Amino acid sequence: MLDATTHGSLLPNRPGVGYKPQHYRDLISEPGCVGWLEVHAENYMGQGGRPLAQLRHLAERFPVSVHGVGLSIGGEGRLDPDHLARLAHLVDWLSPASFSEHLAWSTHDSHFLNDLLPLPYNAATLTRVCDHIDELHDAIGRKMLLENPSSYLAFEASDMTETEFLRAVSERTGCGLLLDVNNVFVSATNLGYAPRAYIEDYPLDRVGEIHLGGHDEDEDEHGAPLLIDSHGREVVDPVWALLDHTLSFSGPRPVLIEWDTDVPDWPVLEAEADRARAALGALVP
C-alpha cells in the first residue's frame, strides 16, 4: 500500500470538514473529532480582511486543504495567468497540506461559467489536461490532487473509461488523486454502472483525499433516477457503504465532509464527521 503523502497530501488520516465562517467559534472551542479543514481557494485570494485573518488563525491549529473550483483544468485555452498568480500567492503564504482541483472545465474564451462541466476521455483531452496540470505544478511548486467529477451524461468521443483516464493523468504528470465517493455514486446511478466496480478499478494507491457529500434525487425525462451533486444535505447510507468498500481496499485516508449549501448548525456537521471517524476507526485492529 502506497502512502498517500507520496501523491500530494500531507493531511492526517482523520475526518475533515469544509470550513464555513459560521462555524469558526465552534472549531476554535469544540472541534470534536475534526482533524483538518478544507477551504475553497477562490474565497481567499484577496488582500486582507476578516476571512484571511480567521484562516490564518485556523491554520495555526489545523492542517488546511485548499480546494480550487475555478482553474478550468479541462478548458481548451491556457490557464488564466491572473487566477494562477493569485492562487500561487495563496499557496505560498498558507503552505497548505494539500491542493486540489476538479477534472472539469468552466471557461470559454473570456467567459467564466458557474459550473463544473464534463469532458470526453480521449487522447486530445488527456494531453490538454496534463499540459494544464504541468503548468499548475510549475506555478505553485507542489503536486496537486485531481478530483473525479459528478457526471450526468457520457460522450461518444470517449475511448477511455474515467478510471483509465485518471490513472493516465496521474502517471503522466505525477499528480495525486482526490476520490469523491459521492461523485462516484451519483455518476454510477446516472450513467448506469456499478459503483463498487468503479472503486475496484480506481488507482487507489494515488489517492491523497476522499470526499463525501450529500446529493439531491430527481428523475430524468424518462422517469429514471437522476442524482444531483448538491452538497446540501447529509451523506446517504449507500454512500457511507461505498466509503466502507473503498477504505477496505485503500486503507485509511483523510476523509472530508462537504456541505456547501443550506449549511447546518455545527452539531449536525460534527455528527457527519464523527461518522467518518467511525468508518476510519473500523480499520484499526
Image: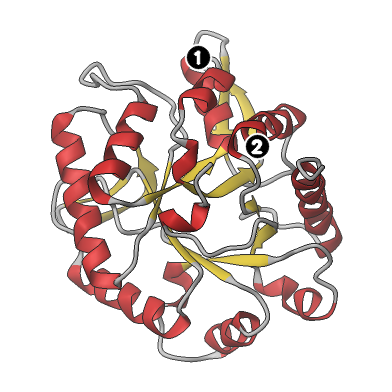
Q: Which mark is residue 113?
A: none
Residue at horizontal 34 percent and vertical 52 percent from the top: 175
Horizontal and vertical percent for residue 219?
58, 18
Q: Is residue 143 above or below residue 116?
A: below
Closest to the camera, between mark 1 and mark 2, is 2
Task: Please indicate whether residue 89 sits to the left or right of residue 55 in the image.
Answer: left
Task: Please indicate whether residue 39 sits to the left or right of residue 147 in the image.
Answer: right
Quarter assignment of residue 118: top left
Residue at horizontal 36 percent and vertical 28 percent from the top: 162
Quarter assignment of residue 7: bottom left
Quarter assignment of residue 33: bottom right
- Quick check: can you spot residue 92? yes
Q: Around disc 1, counting alpha carbons within 10 Å, would you say few (fewer than 14), some (14 to 19), or many (20 or more)?
A: few
| Screen quadrant of the C terminus | top right
Horizontal and vertical percent for residue 243?
67, 35
Q: Tell me the distance, in whole angstroms, between the alpha carbons under discs 1 and 2.
A: 20 Å
Horizontal and vertical percent for residue 16?
67, 59
Q: Amino acid at mark 1?
A: Tyr
For disc 2, the marked residue is 247
Q: Amino acid at mark 2?
A: Leu
Q: Secondary structure at mark 2?
A: helix
| Screen quadrant of the N terminus | top right
Q: Around disc 2, counting alpha carbons within 10 Å, would you say few (fewer than 14), some (14 to 19), or many (20 or more)?
A: some
Residue at horizontal 72 percent and vertical 40 percent from the top: 235
